[in-house]
Amino acid sequence: MQSIICFTSDFGLGDTWVGMCHAVIYRACPQARVVDLAHDIDPFDIRKAAAVAASGVWQLPEAIHLVVVDPGVGGGRRDLCVVTKRGSVLVGPDNGVLVPAIWRAGGIESAFSIVPAQLNFQLPLATFHARDVLAPAAAALACGVEPENIGEPVDPESLGASPFRIGYQEGEALVAEVVDVDRFGSVRLAISQEVMSGLNADPTHLEVSLGHLQMDVPFGRTFSDVSEGELVALFDSSGWLTLAVRLGSAADRLGIEPGSVARVRIGG
């Protein structure tokens, strides 16, 4: 099992929470290597966390991904370990935050509801499952414990719903939600390269409808394919189709927020 643990949360760095999770992991599995993927996600923002985790899985498919944005902690939802068809292993609450990462990793091979007693750890504190259940589970996996030995099998169809829907084809267009706006104001849509390639198209531009906006956007490989201040569509490091302004903010330019719905048609 891979010993890299990619850790995503809404904990911030001003309290003890991230450090305590690191300590629990290293105490249980000293050879584990923890990569802090993101901890400044807005509190309770499952959508943002799901987008970040999906990006992390796309870029580091061989890692264990520990994802903790958990408004329902202690309220009866399950703690999950999910093995994907492409080998990524996901650990997090059953509130939909793992589902987009599952999509990006090829779907579910097997899924388990973590049983704290099988981790040989203290009874979980109701408000801190990250420290008491999820981090120990990630550590056990990093040290070679098989997923079936830390929990009970669950039906993949029973997992909580994703906070957003993956892009889909409707007629000649792709329909997708805005899943994320990064710190540079780039607008990410729930359209993966796999979805785009399914259209068997080699676009030079995209026709994008977002609310009242109708745009013809050049499709590029990188931001510098357009002049400063111009809009470009591309697949960025997240693996999602992205609208960006070179040296500017597409979100500010277009007035777009996560949750907006776009229609994208392939131009010639």
Image: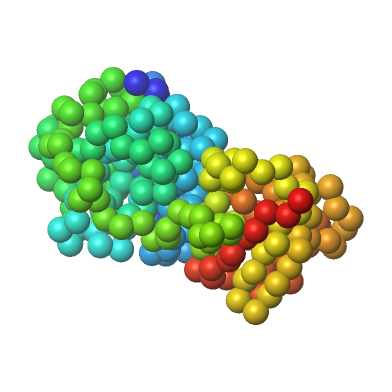
Relative height, residue 197 to residue 69 (above, below)? above
What is the residue that sits farthest to the right in this orientation? 227
In terms of depth relative to the viewer, which is nearer, 92 or 134? 92
Q: Which quarter shows the N terminus?
A: top left
Q: Nearer the viewer, residue 184 or 198?
A: 198
Q: Position of residue 224 (x, y in %)?
A: 84, 47
Q: Nearer the viewer, residue 201 or 234?
A: 201
Q: Is residue 240 visible?
A: yes
Q: Residue at x 73, y 68 (%)?
A: 215
Q: How far across and how far down the image is residue 40, in percent?
A: 51, 56
Q: In the figure, 29 relative to 38: above or below?
A: above
Most distant residue in the front direction: 171
Q: Residue at x 54, y 59 (%)?
A: 171
Whether residue 178 sits left or right of residue 7 in the image: it is right
Left or right of 5 in this view: 141: left
Place residue 145 in its image quadrant: top left
Q: Find residue 124 and report its horizontal and vertical position in percent.
A: 16, 48
Residue at 62% x, 41% y: name it.
200
Asked if residue 244 shows in the view, the reply is: no
User: What residue do we see at 88% from left, 58% from top?
Assistant: 228
Q: In the image, residue 260 lies at what x, y percent?
A: 54, 70
How is this picture coloured? rainbow
Number of dots carrying numbers:
0
